[in-house]
């Protein structure tokens, strides 16, 4: 398991977990993975392009979706499919067959499938070979991960700010009430301060309401 620390308190609740495979011969690996599935929101399921969609995988995917998780299928090892290096047209045709099999057996429980060559991606990153990196299709996987994490981050940020603003609005109300009672003899002189507190309270409540009703698209544009 790898923890990535983010310098923003609410986002520290987001964890990315690399679990053992569910088809492992080691029973402890399978128990560990199933235990995590009860807590996660998004699953990236790794298929193999040279052996797509085993029946046991469909059983597990059904279980994952029944728990309310989103599932994205990463179709790894596209570099092992015929034509990857020397015949792009043939490789495309072969990959279409692979994807057709995956969609037929697992399409109903998967958001989308992302073809990938992890080996080519690692080689490209290690040697700064942009062409090799692009050929691995790692960019598409990055986009999907970013969309999921950025969307979740925006919601958490909105909720965090809304709670803080609500707190400030409550403090403004309490302060106004306290001052009203404490300085009754000097009420006339405190009129400007009271008006200012009224304005702060109203602005804070308006902001909190806007945050609670903001659409996901509006949130992403804002942040």
Image: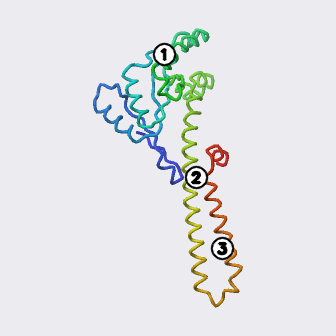
The CA distance from mark 1 to mark 3 is: 64 Å
Is 189 on the left or on the right of 79, as rendered?
right
The disc label shown at residue 101, or none? 1
- Rounded to the nearest whole Å, what is the CA distance between mark 1 and mark 2? 41 Å
Q: Where does the image place residue 22, in percent across and percent down from the top left?
A: 36, 28
> Label for residue 57?
none
Label 3 neighbour load within 10 Å: few <14, some 14-19, many 20+: some
Q: Is residue 199 above or below residue 178?
A: above
In the image, residue 143 sits, relative to residue 117, either above or below, namely: below
| Residue beneath the point at 58% across and 78% down | 177
Give the image location of residue 2, x and y in percent: 43, 40
Query: Looking at the image, can residue 79 be seen?
Result: no
Residue wearing tag 2: 158
- Which residue: 46% across, 15% down? 50
> Marks 1 and 2: CB-CB under 8 Å?
no
* N-term-proximal mark, 1 vs 3: 1
Mark with earlier residue (1, 2): 1
Q: Which residue is mark 3?
A: 197
Q: In the picture, residue 185 is in which quadrant?
A: bottom right
Please state which of residues 134 and 93 is positioned toward the viewer in this rendering.
Answer: 93
Cα–Cα gap, marks 3 and 2: 24 Å
Going from the N terminus, do you reach mark 3 or mark 2 first?
2
Percent across and percent down for residue 203 are: 67, 64
The relative height of residue 107 versus residue 4 in the rendered view (above or below) is above
Asked if labels 3 and 1 touch by Cβ distance under 8 angstroms, the answer is: no
């Amino acid at each position: 398991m790898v923890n990535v620390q983010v310098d923003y308190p609410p986002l520290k609740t987001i964890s990315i977990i690399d679990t053992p495979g569910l088809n492992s011969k080691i029973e402890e690996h399978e128990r560990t993975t199933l235990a995590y599935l009860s807590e996660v929101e998004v699953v990236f399921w790794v298929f193999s392009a040279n052996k797509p969609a085993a029946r046991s995988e469909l059983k597990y995917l059904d279980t994952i979706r029944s728990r309310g998780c989103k599932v994205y299928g990463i179709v790894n090892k596209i570099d092992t499919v015929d034509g990857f290096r020397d015949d792009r047209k043939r490789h495309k045709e072969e990959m279409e067959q692979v994807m057709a099999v995956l969609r037929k057996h697992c399409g109903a429980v998967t958001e989308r499938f992302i073809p990938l060559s992890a080996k080519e991606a690692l080689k490209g990153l290690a040697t700064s070979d942009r062409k090799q990196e692009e050929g691995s299709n790692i960019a598409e996987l990055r986009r999907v991960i970013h969309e999921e994490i950025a969307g979740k981050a925006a919601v958490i940020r909105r909720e965090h700010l809304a709670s803080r603003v609500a707190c400030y609005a409550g403090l403004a109300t309490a302060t106004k009430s306290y001052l009203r009672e404490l300085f009754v003899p000097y009420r006339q002189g405190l009129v400007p301060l009271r008006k200012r507190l009224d304005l702060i309270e109203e602005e804070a409540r308006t902001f909190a309401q806007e945050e609670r009703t903001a659409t996901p698209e509006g949130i992403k544009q804002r942040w």
